[in-house]
Image (spheres, coloured by chain):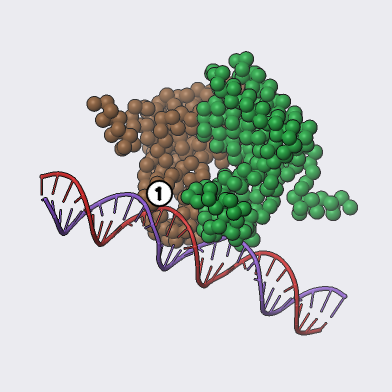
Chain colours: A green, B brown, C red, D purple
Amino acid sequence: MQEQDKTADRNPHIIEDRIIRAALSGQIAPGERLGEKDLSEIFNVSRTLVREAMMRLQARGIVEVSPRRGWFVIEPSVEEARHTIDARRALEVGMLVTIDDIQPAQIRILREHVLSEQQALASGDRAQRSYLLGHFHVCLAETLGNPVLGSLLQDLTTRTVLIAALYQSTHDAHESCCEHGQIIDALEQGDPTEAARLMDVHLRHVEKALNYRHVSNRLEHLKAALQAN
Amino acid sequence: MQEQDKTADRNPHIIEDRIIRAALSGQIAPGERLGEKDLSEIFNVSRTLVREAMMRLQARGIVEVSPRRGWFVIEPSVEEARHTIDARRALEVGMLVTIDDIQPAQIRILREHVLSEQQALASGDRAQRSYLLGHFHVCLAETLGNPVLGSLLQDLTTRTVLIAALYQSTHDAHESCCEHGQIIDALEQGDPTEAARLMDVHLRHVEKALNYRHVSNRLEHLKAALQAN
DNA sequence: GCATTGTATCTTGTATGCAAGATTGTATTC
DNA sequence: GAATACAATCTTGCATACAAGATACAATGC
């Protein structure tokens, strides 16, 4: 982790960026504790900078604080998970239906992104796979020319990845990747309405997995297990 | 400002909340400087807490920092303004088209909100008027049952109020209030598609009322003036 | 008068110290 | 042995001290 020191210097947002990327990559689990002291040692800075990064991540809905106990990566309840996915649906569907035109250059960028997704799928790099499948939505917003939407979607996508009940199998990942391709197809054919419909379906597939609630929250899991017996 | 001490105690988010509310009320102008020392005296806390609040507001896109110069309320460029309003349109239109049903109790809450807006209009309380007209959109999202959307809209709406102040919006408050009522009418009649269309129109009115030529940013204004000559 | 240099001051950037709640483990008491 | 009390430890909460860049202004030199 010493290689960080060079790049970390002089970038006050490096801590958040790393945490977001790790979460998107599935390398940080929901409910995971992020101790100020641990992070300050990892990034070789004082607790002050760690704390400031945590404040920003808190405002972005990625971490929560339990007073005098510690910082924890969010562990959305099923209800919160639905709200997050619903918000994404509203945002992404709204984004697609309000497109007026799209350039071939934009299509190319999106195609390349899906190509990377396919490569990650083929190579078996699960972290890269998880990251790219989530990042597609950010890429879409930014390619369509709206960084505000991109930034909102980065946070919502990260929160979606952190929904514990949504374990993504390799099969699901393939399906997601295909659906990304179909959305681009619709955009290329100048049919944003169809693209929006496909996005709606895509997100419903994600949400559907919530119905088979398996509770990975340790406390909830224990409670459920004990109530069952 | 001493009355704050009682309510401020034990609420770590009071600083941000007050700043957001002041911005929504039009009492804080875009570009306004928010000095850490000033705020720490106003809220009677150390700079640490002020800074932490600033970090959260920064992540929410309400303030920016100029290194070793100070914190400033955002002054969105024309392009950023467009992106913000476009993001709102996507979010709010998407939110309305994905409604499946709405209860009379929800309609009642929204009607009461518009009633408050009308009272503020009649009373001539400009701060309250500005606040309520912006807060309607947050209220709508929350009434529809999605606090995630509500929170996103609070930030986007705050930014929109700042944009309107920056570009000397000529938007008529009465008209806004009427349009809010019409959106509720459509919802009450079980026609979310029409509600979404009205929301689209509403936000287009907001954007249309902006005078993108009027740049109240001092530097930009100067630059534009000198280039023109 | 004008430019420049230096200096005082103001601002944020960062680290550190201490307070205080939360947790864990141990000893004590019955 | 079980429950309770207590102490050691770990964590964040908050304030403060100092560093260092930015700014404004006065002094200086020409």
Asked if residue B54 is positioned above or below residue B74 in the image, the reply reads below
Total count of labels: 1
For this rendering, which residue is in front, B136 or C22?
C22
The residue that mark 1 highlights is B67
Q: Can residue B81 be seen at all in this image of the molecule?
A: yes
Q: Residue B227's image quarter?
A: top left
- Determine the residue positioned at 69% across, 43% down: A26
- Determine the residue positioned at 67% across, 42% down: A25
| Pointer 1 chain | B
Asked if residue B194 is positioned above or below residue A17 in the image, the reply reads above
Q: Residue B3's image quarter?
A: bottom left
Locate residue B40, reporting x and y percent: 42, 58
Q: Can residue B103 be seen at all in this image of the molecule?
A: no
For this rendering, which residue is in front, A24 or B133?
A24
Name the outermost residue toward the top.
Answer: A189
Locate residue A88, reporting x and y percent: 63, 33
